[in-house]
Image (cartoon, rainbow, N blue to C red):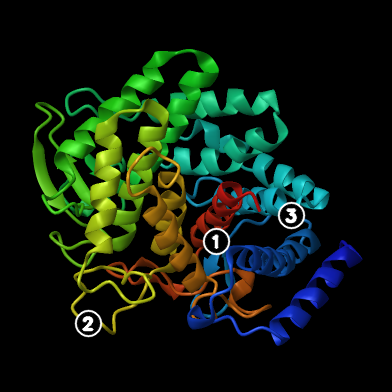
Amino acid sequence: MKRVSSAFYLVLASVLLLSCNQDKTVSDTPDNSQLLSDNIEFALAQMGKQIEIIEASDEVLNPVTVRPDGSVYYCGYRDWRSGFFPGAVWYLYDLSNDPSLKEKAIKYTEAIEEAQFLTSHHDIGFIIGSSFGNGLRLTNNEAYKDIIVQAAKSLTTRFREQPGVIQSWDSDRGWQGERGWECPVIIDNMMNLELLFDATEYSGDSLFYNIAVSHADRTLEEHFREDGSTFHVIDYDLEDGSVRNRHTAQGYSHESAWSRGQAWAIYGYAMCYRETGYQRYLDQAIKAFEFLRDHPDMPEDLIAYWDMDAPDIPNALRDASAAAIIASALYEMSTFPVADAASYKEYADKMMASLSSDAYRAELGTNGNFILMHSVGSIPHDNEIDTPLNYADYYFLEALKRMRDIEGL
């Protein structure tokens, strides 16, 4: 068994002292400097406990969520969420400048290197971008560029010429194979396009960029309703490229507004604007956000219900993961040349204050040692309901990093 540095215990003690003297509530919101330092200290302690468990195992475990029996679920590199814990360690290193975290982030990232060759689903962008993408940003390791480019090549094998999109799921296996789809594309896939933009930058090959733009444009055309809400799944005909179905997989109904899907849309189109400068992408990100912002059922604390058409509102479950994704996207959008830029940051600040409160941030040593509580994976699949999820923590830490950079804290 490996021993853990005493530095972890010093951090734990400092956080325990802090938490005993501080009441974290939305009504008593700290300024962003205090909120940032409080969350960094807490994350160091909470994730430090996760790291202790991993290091003591003599394996490279990859925590995802907590099972109903209270045990932590660890995934392999093929899982779409395998990059988020390594990425969260990178963000915590960025926020704390603790060199021991850099060493851990490198180890956890390189443990999923084989993911660069995955062609069985579209989520290779999530996997490689959150891990190797952040690793490249913080180490300038040129070898990581080659991994990103190879991962982009793997992703492009799923590009379908007639509809002009990247197919999300194979339609001949698993529960997806029971839905009658031919070429299902989910709004989540917008997040994987960043990998393609990066690959063009690192390789000079415009093919990746052109595929990303094709996918973003067709998604913009087909995935959104007039009010700015998004469908979850669009099923395309592979022969003529037409739309066969507009469905959901994880939302309440085909016509409902699944909140995490809305979050992926906001973030994905904001990212596409950053990478291309195309105004249509920024306009769509704004319209998707305004749908949620102006929704009559948006809770006062700004943490959305898992689906904004759930039948049991106001008693429906919230989704902290959707909120963390949206907050991170809004911080980036606040840096764009738009008239409402300041309002996006103000909204994100309020969301982060809510997520940092006792209502959503776990007590030290609980919650499987994840930071945030109350996320929702898929209620229709009776899977990961009202539980921590590693991507909620990832985007929460990313939002903290973006807050810090904007304010120069």
Q: Is 283 situated left or right of 245 in this image?
A: right
Q: Residue at x 37, y 16 (%)?
A: 207
User: CB under 8 Å between callouts 3 and 1?
Assistant: no
Q: Residue at x 46, y 32 (%)?
A: 195
* Front position in the image: 250 or 285: 285
SS type, badge 3: helix
Circle 3 residues within 10 Å: few <14, some 14–19, many ≥20? some
Q: CA distance from mark 1 to mark 2?
A: 26 Å
Question: In which quadrant of the rendered view does residue 364 lie?
Answer: bottom right
Q: Position of residue 114 (x, y in %)?
A: 58, 36
Q: CA distance from mark 3 to mark 1?
A: 16 Å
Q: Is 368 situated left or right of 149 in this image?
A: right
In this rendering, is residue 206 above or below 389? above
> Which badge, 3 or 1, comes first in the chain's sequence?
3
Task: Evaluate whether residue 166 shows in this view.
Answer: no
* Front position in the image: 281 or 338: 338
Q: Which residue is mark 3?
A: 96
Q: Position of residue 273 (x, y in %)?
A: 36, 34
Residue 312 is labelled as 2
User: Which residue type carries mark 1?
Assistant: Asp
User: Which residue type carries mark 2?
Assistant: Asp
> Which badge, 1 or 2, comes first in the chain's sequence?
2
User: Which residue type carries mark 3?
Assistant: Ser
Of circles 3 and 1, the one toward us is 3
Task: Evaluate whether residue 103 shows in this view.
Answer: yes
Q: Position of residue 22 (x, y in %)?
A: 66, 83
The quadrant the N terminus occupies is bottom right
Q: Residue at x 38, y 22 (%)?
A: 209
Q: Which residue is mark 1?
A: 393
Q: Is 200 situated left or right of 55 in this image?
A: left
Question: In which quadrant of the rendered view does residue 137 lie?
Answer: top right
In this rendering, is residue 321 above or below 144? below
